[in-house]
Image (tube, rainbow, N blue to C red):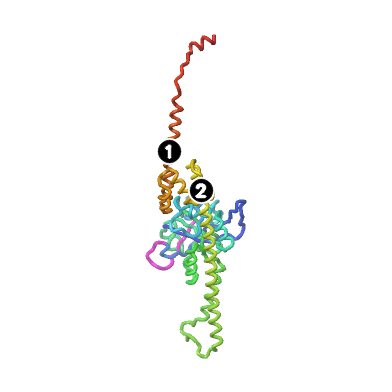
């Protein structure tokens, strides 16, 4: 069974390496009894279940080793991190995992520039462990179930912690978020943004203000004797609060789009540079401009091998061109190998010569 656990990042002892990486001391998890939705446990029922995380489940050698060098991600991926998707998902790693008292501690090494900005500037300061774990009937008092040893897969930067404020970078709490907070958290999550503690606090305050304007059960909806001026003022304040909340959401969405665009541009340029280096090494007889686009590099390589003529290559889609480029590489390699073989064959068959060892030996006497 797969689990995700959220906790808050440590706010002290952060360091920046000479290469610009962010290193954050962290507490990944702790021993205790925690609330989980029944659906999170794979149960076909509603409600909340209490699950014990024991010393055996948290501090086994297998568990600690599984979290060492675990991939750090932004949000939980739809699938477990593996060799196929690691490059797209990783923003860093978790290192130096060890037990300290009843807590599992580590260091979060954040490599990605945008992820560092999210942590340092946006105030997103929580992590969530993603791991495989079985549950079984509990032998612990006041717990419905207990966990088998946890096998770590990744650690994600997320929104809300399950284990409480004392645990940094750990467990997701899906049970006690307000309706507004859940909605906004899900909405922003689609854009890769998570609410900070300050933002969530402001939402709770806004909700309280909204409740003050709503009638309690059993009370009349409005006092007919209320002054129109007071009623208008309350409505005005509520509209201002709603508008302010929407503006904050809009600002966060815009800023996140900028971060995503910048990341996409960086990744695109990295791909172009890697392809250019690969093309220059694979097609020695072709001249590639250093400013050439991915499409131009691939097209020049394909045309050079004669797989497609220039007008035919222009009609290919980007995906077809990428496939044609790989075929051109294979063709170029075969041609190069064949030419090399011809040279070696010629060199390996030198003109026959004779040598008279008897004459040589007589001359040496």
Give the farthest residue toward the front. Answer: 311
**Element at badge 1?**
helix
Question: Could you classify mark 2 by the number of other residues whose Cα lies within 10 Å: few (under 14), some (14-19), or many (20 or more)?
Answer: few
Q: How crowded is mark 1: few (under 14 residues within 10 Å), some or many (20 or more)?
A: few
Q: Earlier in the sequence, mark 1 or mark 2?
A: 2
Q: In this view, does 216 lie above or below 311?
A: below
- Residue visible at 57% across and 63% down? 123
Find the magenta span and give its range.
41-56
How far separated are the C-alphas under marks 1 and 2?
A: 23 Å
Residue holding disc 2: 274
Which residue is at the front of the view, 216 or 255?
Answer: 255
Which quadrant of the figure contains the N terminus? bottom left
| Residue 336 spot, x, y in % from top left | 45, 37
Tell me how many marks there are. 2
Work out whether residue 256 or residue 144 is closer to the camera in this orientation and state it.
Answer: 256
> Does residue 254 sit above or below 214 in this rendering?
above
Residue at the disc numbered 1: 335
């Amino acid at each position: 069974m797969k689990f995700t656990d959220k906790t808050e990042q440590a706010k002290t002892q952060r360091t920046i390496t000479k290469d610009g990486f962010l290193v954050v001391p962290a507490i990944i998890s702790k021993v205790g009894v925690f609330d989980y939705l029944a659906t999170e446990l794979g149960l076909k029922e509603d409600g909340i279940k209490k699950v014990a995380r024991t010393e055996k489940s948290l501090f086994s050698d297998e568990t600690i080793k599984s979290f060492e060098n675990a991939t750090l991600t932004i949000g939980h991926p739809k699938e477990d991190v593996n060799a196929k998707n690691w490059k797209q998902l990783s923003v860093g790693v978790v290192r130096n995992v060890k037990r300290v008292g009843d807590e599992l501690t580590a260091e979060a090494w954040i490599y990605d520039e945008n992820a560092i900005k999210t942590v340092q500037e946006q105030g997103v300061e929580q992590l969530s462990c993603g791991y495989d774990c079985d549950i079984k009937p509990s032998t612990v008092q006041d717990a419905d179930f207990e966990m088998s040893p946890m096998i770590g897969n990744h650690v994600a930067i997320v929104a809300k912690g399950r284990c409480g404020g004392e645990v940094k970078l750990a467990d997701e709490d899906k049970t006690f978020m307000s309706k507004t907070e859940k909605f906004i958290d899900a909405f922003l999550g689609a854009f890769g943004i998570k609410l900070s503690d300050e933002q969530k606090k402001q939402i709770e305050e806004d909700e309280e203000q909204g409740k003050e304007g709503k009638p309690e059960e059993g009370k009349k909806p409005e006092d007919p004797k209320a002054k129109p001026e007071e009623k208008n003022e309350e409505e005005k304040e509520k509209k201002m609060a709603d508008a302010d909340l929407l503006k904050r959401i809009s600002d966060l969405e815009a800023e996140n789009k900028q971060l995503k665009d910048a990341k996409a541009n960086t990744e695109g340029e990295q791909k172009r540079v890697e392809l250019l280096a690969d093309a220059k090494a694979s097609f020695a007889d072709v001249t590639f401009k250093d400013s050439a686009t991915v499409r131009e590099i691939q097209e020049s390589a394909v045309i050079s091998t004669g797989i497609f003529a220039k007008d035919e290559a222009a009609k290919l889609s980007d995906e077809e061109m990428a496939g044609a480029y790989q075929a051109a590489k294979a063709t170029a390699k075969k041609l190069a190998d064949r030419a090399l073989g011809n040279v070696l064959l010629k060199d390996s068959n030198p003109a026959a010569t004779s040598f008279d060892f008897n004459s040589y030996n007589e001359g040496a006497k």
